[in-house]
Image (tube, rainbow, N blue to C red):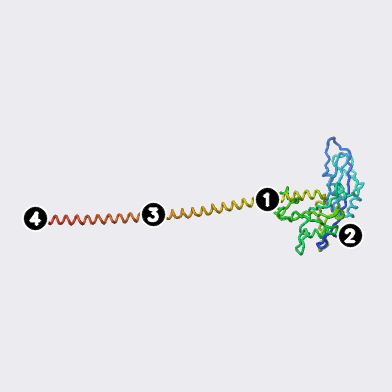
Amino acid sequence: MSEELIPFFTYRDLYLKPLNKVDITVNLPKLRQLGQSVSNWEIRERLKKMLTAIEMTDFKVLDSNLEQVQFAAIINSSADSKYVIKNLDGISFRAVGFTEPLTVSATRGDLDSQLAWTGISERPDTIYIGGLPFEWFKSPINESYETTFHQIFSEFGEVSAVDIPQCDPLRKQMDDEISGITLSSWSFGQDLFFEVYVQFKDYTGFVNAMTALCGKILVQKTPGNLLIARSLKEVVAKEEEQIKEEKSESNLAKSEELARQLMRAEKRRKFELQKNYEQKLREKLKVKLCERLHCAQKKERSVPKLYLITLLAYIGRKRQELKLRSRIAERMLMNKDYSTK
């Protein structure tokens, strides 16, 4: 298996491993009942059970009608693809609902990697790759991911630009429709995978890179010589004009998003100023209210004391009056007694 590995980024033990396609056709006999449906899933599962020992990257239905069902199986090694063809081609099996056995034919398929860019009208210069693990491309000397990919793809030709949307903090804050980020994050905001755009200065470098990448999976060799495979989500060619248009739209979206962020920041600033003003006003009102309450409490405490003083003064005056009247009465009584004598 190791002889199939193609060096990609050996500093991190990363290699490209060719995929092998097997075209499988299942010919369908007549159904027992008119109008009875055919279960492609059931047929697919029957075939997979025959290949339990084979590691497949994909096994999907390409076409289906009343006469046959066409499958495409992506096999991880050429030896396994030969095994699949040998064990499936020419066999037959019975299935529920059919009067006769179903026959199978299996042939080696073409991945048609060249179709990834030959259909484009103008010469493309940019490759898009999705589904790359961040962990696999960490630099031990703290180089940026863009620098790492610039070094990797320089092996195919002169690179003019590398763009990784997940490494742009501003785009990560934008809406999905304008950010250019197509991969979802499933780790509570922490990205596990990323996508990359690599632009070459000439068409030759682009062709070399597409030829090397298409029809491959990315694998990492562990210290125990185990291979951890990672299917490249997408390897797509893009035209220069399309890239320029996308970059223009992205820059416009960035400017619009930046303007929205500035407006939101200004609103937050005004809100904070208003909030601080209202807070200071509440504090002033609180101080005034406390002063008034304090004065009111002092008045409430001083009223009984003043009343008591007034009452004591009144009692004192009354006592003086009584004493004066008593003396006057005594004098009058003494004068009366003296006159009678």
Q: Is residue 137 above or below residue 104?
A: below
* Res. 24 visible in picture: yes
Q: Nearer the viewer, mark 2 or mark 3?
A: 3
Q: Which mark is residue 339?
A: 4
- Name the amino acid type tagged 3: Lys
**Sequence-wise first label, 1 or 2:** 2
Residue closer to the observer: 219 or 301: 301
**Sequence-wise first label, 1 or 4:** 1
Label 3 secondary element? helix
Q: Are marks 1 and 2 in contact (CB under 8 Å)?
A: no
- Whole-angstrom CA distance, mark 2 to mark 4, is 159 Å
Q: Which residue is mark 2?
A: 3
- Left/right placement of residue 333 relative to residue 46 reads left
Q: Which mark is residue 299?
A: 3
Q: Are marks 2 and 4 in contact (CB under 8 Å)?
A: no
- Whole-angstrom CA distance, mark 3 to mark 4, is 60 Å
**Sequence-wise first label, 3 or 1:** 1
